[in-house]
Image (cartoon, rainbow, N blue to C red):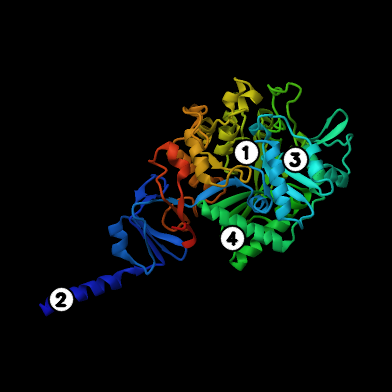
Amino acid sequence: MKRIIFLVFISCFYASAQKKTVDLIVKNAVVYTVDAQYSKAEAFAIQNGVFVEIGTNKNILAKYQSKNQIDAKGKPVFPGLYDPHSHFLGLGEMLNQCDLSGTRSFEEILQKLGEFAKKNPGNDWIIGRGWDQNDWVVKSFPNKDQLDALFPNKPVFLTRIDGHAALVNSKAIQLSKITPSTKTSGGDVEVMDGQLTGILIDNAMGFVDRIIPQPDETEKRKMILDAQAECFKYGLTTVSDAGLSQDDIELIDKMNKEGILKIRNYVMVSLGIRNVEYFIKKGIIKTDRLNVRSFKLYADGALGSRGASLLAPYSDEPSKSGFLLLSPAELERNLALIYNSDYQANTHCIGDSANRLILNLYGKLLKGKNDRRWRIEHCQVVHPDDMNKFGKYSVIPSVQGTHATSDMYWAEARLGKKRVKSAYAFNELKKQNGLIANGSDFPVEHVNPIYGFHAAVARQDGKNWPAKGFQMENALTRSDALRAMTIWSAYANFEEKERGSIEKNKMADFVILDSDLMTMPKEKMRQTKVLFTFVGGEKVYQSKP
């Protein structure tokens, strides 16, 4: 009997000795690898921040051992989630401002501003963001009169939810020296009956924005870390900051090197002479956390503030058809500079006129199929005659699912019954190159990528309205929606060989959810919670019990 026990012990000892020791094992999971075969697995092993093997529980546990193991207990595991178009630093700024999102009237905004001012008596400016007049009973732009009564001596700057319009009070107007005769290209200073209303659209916002005191490095560091915590809570492991300056990029790089900023960031450099010259000369910047290889351009404004450039006038305001933020000549000149570098061009286009212009300019330079992976950001309204140009010139559509479900209440009024059918055409856009990237544009929309997944699949809002979905012919399948926030977004960022799926030798970025997005009822998707978020095999978030 003793001999049998001894032989069993020896057998177990050698079996254990032959196992490779790794940093982490995840087992008993439903692993959606999002590899080329869209295969599923049960377990995987991680060493030095990368996946070393993915397979069955039996296979992984037979070959590997670790002091750190996670028993997923049948929960779904997905690759780390991407947001291919966001404003990461902007989220950090908004978390430190007065949040006006979801407000249902201007009176509610005034109440929030009053409460914010009491809590922050030392603030020289009252800064807020998130209002949307389309959500109010009275859907016209507000004016500054009530702001002046509440804040007669303190400047106020309130950015609309899309970031393309703002309401300011008289004190801010005084400091910025705006008058009723002030003009700007690519923007509008609203005047009624010869008086300023306080509404500034697109480039006109710059008159006030440039005189607002900028946060110092200490304040900015806090904003960045606040944004990181918010992203990790919702399973985001890679963000794409759509427009940063050289100084902000260098601060992010510094925080990466210090080891305190762990989220991965695909940065689009803000267009500007200084930035273009500096970064084209410097070349692509690539570390495991930071990837700087694209420029962010703006062709037009936003649909909600009627700044989107349309081929025909707005259906609900025939005197307007939007405008370009840069002239066609300026856009072409900058795109030519980018084309002659190693950088990618990512251009904001909302209206069908802006999309047509940029697709044609891209085509003039790219000429045909290519691997430059130039992108159009948003591509909200695309004329049917221009849709094939995405495929013809290998242009990647970078969309935001929740834009469709935020705008659907009023989009038809803006565009008319016929034109709205070619808006938010995610499935049609996906067909052009066999892929699409889906993000959020946060803080324009909520940071939670699961909301974008639900919007792309169900074409419904948070209350699961409308019952049959909004223009369901352009919904994405669940598998495509998952690809759009993982491997396809990685491809749009030139990162598909290093992450975006759970595969051997790729960076070990993954999330564990409490519910399976691929099988659960659509109406419950937005209730899904993130249990764990891992970046490079390191746990960066765990939900509280």
Q: Is residue 336 left or right of residue 14?
A: right
Label pair 3/2, CB-CB below 8 angstroms: no
Mark 1 and mark 4 lie on one chain; the one further toward the N terminus is 4
Mark 2 and mark 4 lie on one chain; the one further toward the N terminus is 2
Give the camera-side residue of 13 and 90.
90
Q: Choose mark 1 or mark 3, whichever is in front.
A: 3
Q: Choose mark 2 or mark 4, whichever is in front.
A: 2
- Separation of marks 3 and 4 at Cα, in angstroms: 36 Å
Q: Which mark is residue 166?
A: 3
- Separation of marks 1 and 4 at Cα, in angstroms: 25 Å
Given the image, on which type of amino acid does mark 3 rest? Ala
Label pair 1/4, CB-CB below 8 angstroms: no
- Separation of marks 2 and 4 at Cα, in angstroms: 53 Å
- Whether residue 434 can be seen here: no
Given the image, on which type of amino acid does mark 1 rest? Ile
Q: Which mark is residue 287?
A: 4
Q: Choose mark 3 or mark 2, whichever is in front.
A: 3
Q: Which mark is residue 376?
A: 1
Mark 1 and mark 3 lie on one chain; the one further toward the N terminus is 3
Q: Is residue 387 above or below residue 60?
A: above
Mark 2 and mark 1 lie on one chain; the one further toward the N terminus is 2
Given the image, on which type of amino acid does mark 2 rest? Ile
Q: Is residue 532 above or below residue 413?
A: below
Task: Tell which residue pokes out farthest to the left in this image.
Answer: 1
